[in-house]
Image: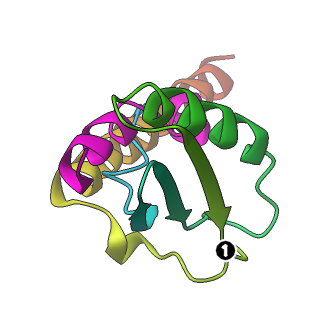
């Protein structure tokens, strides 16, 4: 067992808020993983939260324990989280930033189209 194998498993976990936003970004690509500590058969994963008000901590605990705990040689897993004020978008991978920007742009374009259609409907009436 090593950091790379653990990171592979953590990369399978999609951040629920990014899923709700339609971007499906992993907690690794979002830069949420701060540190992995391996002590014999025990693994501690330290993770940034994106906000102090994160309500997904139970989800993250379950996912990290299930995925990392299923690796050969791992007997126990602990997830530690921070206060949610340290994370910034600068921690995201380039690919994650690009995907998020594309989604934001698509939403802005759709909003402008809808607003334009409403404006035309008012002037036609």
The vertical placement of 16 against 45, above or below, is above
Q: What residue do we see at 29% from left, 47% from top?
A: 7
The vertical placement of 30 against 117, above or below, is below
In the picture, measured across the screen, residue 4 lies left or right of residue 22, that is left
Per the rendered image, the range of residues in magenta is 1-22
In the picture, measured across the screen, residue 81 lies left or right of residue 22, that is right
**Horizontal and vertical percent position of residue 80:** 65, 64
Q: What residue do we see at 52% from left, 75% from top?
A: 87
Residue 30: quarter of image: bottom left
Residue 52: quarter of image: bottom right
Q: What residue do we see at 41% from left, 56% from top?
A: 40
Dominant secondary-structure state across the stretch colored magenta: helix
* Residue 113 visible in the shown view: no
Which of 92 and 116 lies nearest the eye of the viewer? 92
In the picture, measured across the screen, residue 56 lies left or right of residue 91, that is right
The quarter of the image holding the C terminus is: top right
Which residue is labeled 1 in the image?
Answer: 82
**Horizontal and vertical percent position of residue 62:** 67, 32
Q: What residue do we see at 17% from left, 60% from top?
A: 94
Question: Within the magenta stretch, is there residue 97?
Answer: no
The vertical placement of 92 against 67, above or below, is below
**Horizontal and vertical percent position of residue 50:** 60, 64
Which of 26 and 68 lies nearest the eye of the viewer? 68
* Residue 84 visible in the shown view: yes
């Amino acid at each position: 067992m090593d950091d790379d194998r653990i990171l592979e498993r953590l990369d399978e976990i999609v951040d629920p808020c990014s899923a709700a936003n339609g971007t499906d970004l992993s907690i690794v690509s979002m830069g949420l993983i701060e540190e992995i500590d391996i002590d014999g058969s025990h693994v501690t994963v330290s993770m940034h939260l994106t906000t102090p008000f994160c309500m997904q901590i139970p989800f993250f605990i379950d996912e990290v324990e299930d995925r990392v705990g299923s690796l050969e040689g791992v007997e126990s897993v602990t997830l530690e989280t921070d206060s949610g004020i340290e994370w910034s978008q600068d921690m995201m991978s380039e690919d994650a930033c690009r995907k998020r920007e594309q989604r934001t742009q698509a939403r802005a374009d759709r909003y402008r189209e809808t607003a334009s259609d409403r404006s035309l409907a008012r002037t036609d009436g």
